[in-house]
Amino acid sequence: MARRRRSRGNNAQQLQNAPNRRGHTQRALREPAVYAKPTGFKSEVPHEKLTITQARKGTPANRPVRVYADGIFDLFHSGHARALMQAKNVFPNTHLIVGVCSDELTHKLKGYTVMTEEERYDALRHCRYVDEVVRDAPWTLTPEFLKKHKIDFVAHDDIPYTSAGSEDVYKHIKEAGMFVATERTEGISTSDLITRIVRDYDIYVRRNLQRGYTARELNVGFIKENTYRLQNQVDKMKETVRTVEEKSKHFVNRVEEKSQDLIHKWEEKSREFIGNFLELFGPDGAWHVIQERSGRMLQALSPYSSPRGSPSSSPTRANSTPPDSPTSTAFRPSSPTSAHKKRSRSSPKVSSTDRRPVQ
């Protein structure tokens, strides 16, 4: 098992270092592209001229097709990268060479650049599609330059490029059958980026002042600097007011939501309370049932009610016989005073004439 694993590892390393089907060593995307030698490209294999048909078939197998693309590449952006990607994939087996013009030549024939030539060279070296970078590339491609770097085809967009007194600097390349066209990316270019910066100049100056750049570094006068700083303070105040307004709106919305929730809960609780009250004290409620049952129990315990004039309603008096019953007189005890009254009532009346003095 150990021998098999070692053999697999050695095979993988050999495949990585060996030439691939495109005819050159496949580099991992971990290092920047190399610079072209001032003396040009030298190869042990004889460099034969290819046609576009042969190159698209992937022949010859012993070497890649050397495609050249040139430009200024100032403020390197996605439009540049897409053009180079098309140039890299125009043939199955492509070695992409990118030529970058120097500052002196560019400022003379086109205009000033934002990035220096060294910055532009280094930006191209770190593009994943680029295999080789030619520094101080010529403005017009000569046969000597093409032969020096063994260039098979030149890639550029098909729009005629008017410059240096020529209607199209690639006209002789097209006539020689060495031109392959790429498509431009609409909506982005170096000129568009510079236009955005110039249009919003004040915004970017204020931005850099906030980031710590001095007015001297930005080439801004004293009055303009104070104006920008005042505008920054005003913007900060506006932002603070806007933040307070948003927070207050959020707070008011939260209060409204909470109040609505409380109202809904209060309505639900009130409905529940009213329903429970009606169930308990309504005409068919439990309270009336309890009263009826308690009344029946009281009637069962005390069938006769006590006299209205009685000072108390004790159970003994409530259970006593009524005064109108015949048994009440028979068993009522007689007091001495009542017997005397009866005797006085039953004794005959004696007249005053019948009174005789006691002798």
Image (cartoon, rainbow, N blue to C red):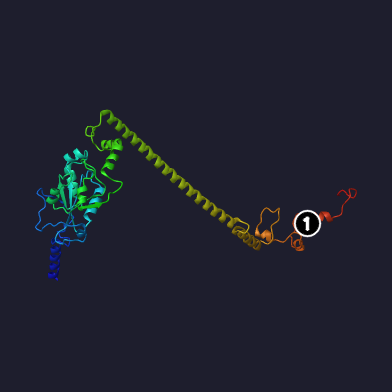
* Towards the viewer: 248 or 346: 248
Label total for image: 1
Q: Which residue is mark 1?
A: 339
Q: Which image quarter holds the N terminus?
A: bottom left
Residue farthest along the right direction in this orientation: 353
Q: Based on the displayed image, in which of its 4 quarters is residue 224 positioned?
A: top left
> Horizontal placement of 62 versus 195: left or right?
left
Q: Residue at x 15, y 46 (%)?
A: 135
Residue 290 placement (x, y as % from top left): 60, 60
Residue 206 placement (x, y as % from top left): 28, 36
Residue 290 showing in the rendered view: yes
Q: Based on the displayed image, in which of its 4 quarters is residue 116 positioned?
A: top left
Residue 170 placement (x, y as % from top left): 21, 47
Residue 4 placement (x, y as % from top left): 14, 70
Residue farthest along the front direction in this orientation: 175
Kindly state the secondary structure of the residue where label 1 is placed.
helix
Q: Residue at x 28, y 42 (%)?
A: 192
Q: Based on the displayed image, in which of its 4 quarters is residue 166 positioned?
A: top left
* Towards the viewer: 116 or 1: 116
Q: Residue at x 53, y 51 (%)?
A: 267
> Horizontal placement of 39 versus 338: left or right?
left
Residue farthest along the top direction in this orientation: 223
> Horizontal placement of 353 versus 126: left or right?
right
* Towards the viewer: 240 or 49: 49
Residue 85 showing in the rendered view: no
Mark 1 surroundings: few (<14), some (14-19) or many (≥20) residues within 10 A: few
Identify whether 62 is placed above or below 41.
below
Task: Identify residue type, mark 1.
Answer: Ala
* Towards the viewer: 327 or 27: 27
